[in-house]
Image (cartoon, grey):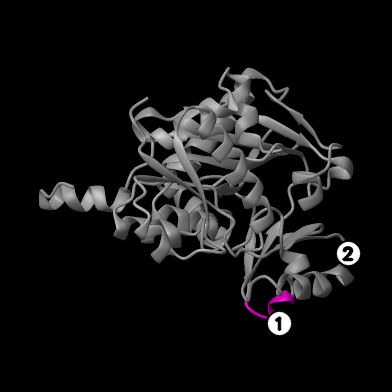
Amino acid sequence: MRAMGKVAVLYGGTSAEREVSLMSGKGVHDALVSRGIDAHLFDLGQKSLAEFAQQGFDRAFIALHGRLGEDGTVQGALELLGVPYTGSGPQACCIAMDKVMTKRLWQQEGLNTPKFRILHGESDLDGLVEELGLPLMIKAPNEGSTLGLYKVSRPEELLPAYQKARKFDDVLLAEQFIKGRELTVALLGDRASLQVLPVIEIVAPGGNYDYEHKYFSDETQYLCPAPLSQSCTQRIQELAKSAFLSIGCSGWARVDVMLDADEQPWLLEVNASPGMTGHSLVPMAAKAVGVSYEELCERILASASCKVRKTADARTGLTE
């Protein structure tokens, strides 16, 4: 591995996922330090980007989740500062964070994703059950970690679910519910060197993979590699790869998929800044191919770069 210089682990932040980010950042920081890297925790919920700019960091590991951390905002600021960072660039992060835009792009690319409708107000609930069937999902499209996510099984549950989700976003996403197996696929690298890690199957108590079961419960089971046929595994991995590349992701990401009874995979979303906690799935998939948590963190950090700046400099002939 090449010299990393002074590294900031950006974590915490101000989003609804701050608690998870604090855990991710601490884990990443400790792993990098254990590899002899000059890593420093930097909480963007308590310190400003102005303070960050003054501290002379050579690169940044983004362990932020949610708004103002995973949505392209911080990535754009780092581009302006000329500090290489982990993960995707501002545009890809912005698209991945917005589930509506992600699904529109996938539809345009011919990639399989559940039917959906955008909800601007309560009047948009009219005819929704007839269109999408029951059960259906109501989602806050700019949240993650299952926040603002509600399953509607009966017509009378629709309005309360909508009202609860509106606490997270003004414009909501109603999505066809796909009954089946919940899967996720982690990817490392970029278009030229993309590695698709083993598929993980998530088996949550009662099929309820909510915030508690995702980060804190020991009841959720993770099957890695998922018990699937080789042909089914390959189809899921190829779909995840297409989903990753269609958005323009780079560095690393995780793609969530549902597999129905006919073994048809359906794309749900892309996480451009996945969790790195003790319950997180990217480290689990990496471990299945012999990559330790510490090695994974260093590998991700080594891929840090300025995406927009690099492209601009290449066009103008400028160098840093």
**Residue 217 placement (x, y as % from top left):** 83, 42
**Residue 129 placement (x, y as % from top left):** 78, 66
Q: Which residues are magenta?
A: 120-126
Q: Residue at x 74, y 77 (%)?
A: 126
Does the magenta portion include 110?
no
**Residue 30 placement (x, y as % from top left):** 58, 36
Q: Quadrant of the N terminus?
A: top left
Look at mark 2 in the image and give the residue it sits on.
154
Disc number for residue 123: 1
For disc 1, the neighbor class at 10 Å (few under 14, some 14 to 19, many from 20) is few
What is the three-letter code of the residue carrying label 1?
Answer: Ser
- Residue 196 against residue 17 in the figure, above or below: above
Query: What kind of element bears circle 2?
Result: loop
What is the three-letter code of the residue carrying label 2?
Answer: Arg
Query: What kind of element bears circle 1?
Result: helix
**Residue 160 placement (x, y as % from top left):** 83, 73
Q: Residue at x 81, y 50 (%)?
A: 212
Residue 238 seen by the camera: no
Q: Are marks 1 and 2 in contact (CB under 8 Å)?
A: no
